Amino acid sequence: MKIYIFIIILLSTFVVNAQKSNQDIKNKIGIGGIAGINFSKFSYSSDNYNYDNSTFLNSQFGLATEFYFSEKLSIRPSLLYAGRGMLIKQDEVNYMLSSKNIDWSVPVIYTFAPDNTVNPYIYIAPMLETTFGGKLGYGNVSTELSKANHSSTGLSLTPAMGLKFNLSEKTYLSFEAGYHIGLSNTFSKDELAGSADALNVSNYSIEGKRKNRALVFMASFIIKINKKDKKENKPVEEDVVIKEDKQIKKVVPEKDTVEVVADTTAKVVENKVDYTVKEIEKDIKEGIDVTNRKITFNNIEFELNKTKLTQNSKNYLNEIIEFLKNNKKIKTQINGHTDNTGTNEVNMKLSIGRAKSVYDYLISTGIEKSRLSYKGYGDTLPIETNDTKTGRAKNRRVEFKIISNK
């Protein structure tokens, strides 16, 4: 009874904590494989079976799917082939109980740090066991275990802990260790009824209970499948609005709007916050002032909680480097931003350090210091909500703000 109360409390804790985490997740389903080993034996309820026994090494493997309810909570239904059993020594006779099982397991998984590259997690896995083969024997004498000495079905529970290693946004490899607890009596119905026939013993009966126990070590590889994006009925907004007038007029700029005094076919760009390098280059060729415009990069990555640029990020920066080399009059300010993970002080230092890291890299490629400056804003200027993983990723950004085009 105590074990069932423990299961209810633990599952309730998982659900409550998951409700506090993000529900806006990019991936809903994962598929993959799982494999490992177990060191199994039996536990007995009666002193009559105080055998000298040793653990039995078996393999187990199968297929798994994973369903994500939030960033922290998921379930991973698995269909496993597993061997279990035990070696028994008694009165100079070595018995071997070796069972073969098909198990249906449903681990309920709670992940503690879903945003990290390495994620610790725990789970509790109810399991339905079906025994279809194996043997009970010694020497050259044996009997099929599932017919003589083992129940055909059973229930068990496996609490475990592990580590997920995120290989990419869509794949992870995990390693876990758990303890398999059999909840059902594995003695066969015939044994309990006194009509069992095993080896050279006929019509014998047995009392008490025998339950599976095992140390389990598993590895799994999961590929996540993206959910379909829901279409939102939002009004289509024009990124660029071009106005023409035969009279000279002054346009009052809004946020991040370029102020232009135009004549006849003068062009004014309004109400756009972020631009691509190609858009900026196109407007420069058309004679449009690009001062105060921002080019935002969300793919500039740094080592975890550090300011050092990754090699991939340096490759992404080649586009802005080429742009600056082709447009010698452009001066830009590099702005660093973070999400709200961590304290304000830490985020501010991190954003400044990362902006400076980009600044230093651009200088190392030949861009003049006089054309560059940098500033950090920490988490003070989010462009998306910090309540979702997607929003936090967009807030962790590097901006190049054009401060002069002359």
Image (cartoon, rainbow, N blue to C red):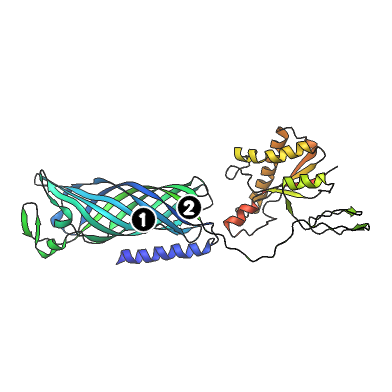
Look at 20% across and 53% down and name the residue there.
133
Earlier-in-chain disc, 2 versus 1? 1
Q: Nearer the viewer, residue 5 or 300?
A: 300
Q: Position of residue 119 (x, y in %)?
A: 48, 50
Mark 1, secondary structure of its residue:
strand
Vertical arrangement, residue 13 with respect to residue 314, above or below: below
Q: Is residue 310 visible?
A: no
Which residue position holds label 1? 78
Residue 217 placement (x, y as % from top left): 34, 47
User: Is residue 266 visible from the viewing direction of this image?
Assistant: yes
Quarter of the image holding residue 14?
A: bottom left
Q: Say the numbered circle drawn on residue 342.
A: none
What amino acid is at disc 1? Ser
Q: In this image, 316 relative to 111: left or right? A: right
Q: Viewed as shown, does residue 156 lie left or right of 145?
A: right
Q: Label 2 belongs to which residue?
A: 224
Give percent across and percent down for residue 349. Answer: 67, 46
Q: Is residue 293 left or right of residue 171?
A: right
Q: Residue at x 53, y 62 (%)?
A: 23
> Circle 2 — which element?
strand
Q: Is residue 205 above or below residue 57?
A: below
Q: CA distance from mark 2 to mark 1?
A: 15 Å
Q: Residues within 10 Å of mark 1 (few under 14, many from 20)?
A: many
Q: Quadrant of the N terminus?
A: bottom left
Q: Badge 2 local density, few (<14 within 10 Å), some, or many (20+)?
A: many
Q: Position of residue 256 (x, y in %)?
A: 79, 55
Determine the image quadrant of residue 22: bottom right
What residue is shown at x 9% (from left), y 51% (from top)?
199
Query: Of the residues shown, which amino acid type is indicated by label 2?
Result: Lys
